[in-house]
Amino acid sequence: MNLKLLPRKGVLPYEHLTHLDVLSETDLPPCYAFAKLLSGSEISKADYANEQNVCTTFRCRTMRDSLVLYQMTDVCLLADVFQTFRANSKEAYDWDQGTL
């Protein structure tokens, strides 16, 4: 597996996930399905191509597989940010937020 694909924020077609049946879909939704209605922003072609590559590399067979990978990656990236902040605070201020 190519873990170099994961250390970036993934993309998820939030508005496309309208009901549980969507999680059984076997094809990646089209690029326009990744648009964010609230912000009016659309996914870039590069981000869509990266998502296709991630799904292929990590053998995501359904939207459920993609969602699980997205959530696991998102949580791991956030945990890494917290751990880095904790280490930097300990070094700079001799303060460990993990003990609060």
Image (cartoon, rainbow, N blue to C red):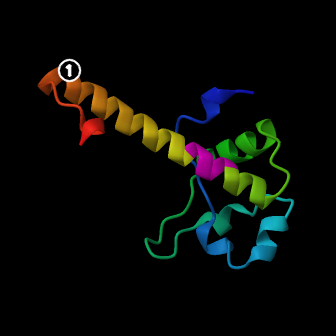
Towards the viewer: 61 or 88: 88
Question: Dividing the picture into quarters, in which one does residue 91 lie?
Answer: top left
Which residue is outermost to the top?
A: 91
Residue 9 visible in the picture: no
Identify whether 73 is placed above or below 43. above
Which residue is outermost to the front?
A: 99
Towards the viewer: 68 or 43: 68
Taking the spot 76% from the left edge, 75% from the top edge, the residue there is: 20
81 sits to left or right of 25: left
Identify whether 1 is placed above or below 25. above
The majority secondary structure of the magenta stretch comes to: helix
**How many numbered marks does the figure carry?**
1
Q: Quadrant of the C terminus?
A: top left
The residues colored magenta run: 69-73
Element type at marker 1? helix
Q: Position of residue 77 (x, y in %)?
A: 48, 40
Q: Residues within 10 Å of mark 1 (few under 14, many from 20)?
A: few
Q: Quadrant of the N terminus?
A: top right
Task: Give amino acid for label 1.
Answer: Glu
Magenta span includes 18: no
Taking the spot 83% from the left edge, 42% from the top edge, the residue there is: 59
Q: Position of residue 37 (x, y in %)?
A: 51, 76
Taking the spot 47% from the left edge, 72% from the top edge, the residue there is: 40
Which residue is outermost to the bottom?
A: 19
Q: Which residue is mark 1?
A: 91
74 sits to left or right of 63: left
Towards the viewer: 76 or 37: 76
Taking the spot 15% from the left edge, 24% from the top edge, the residue there is: 94
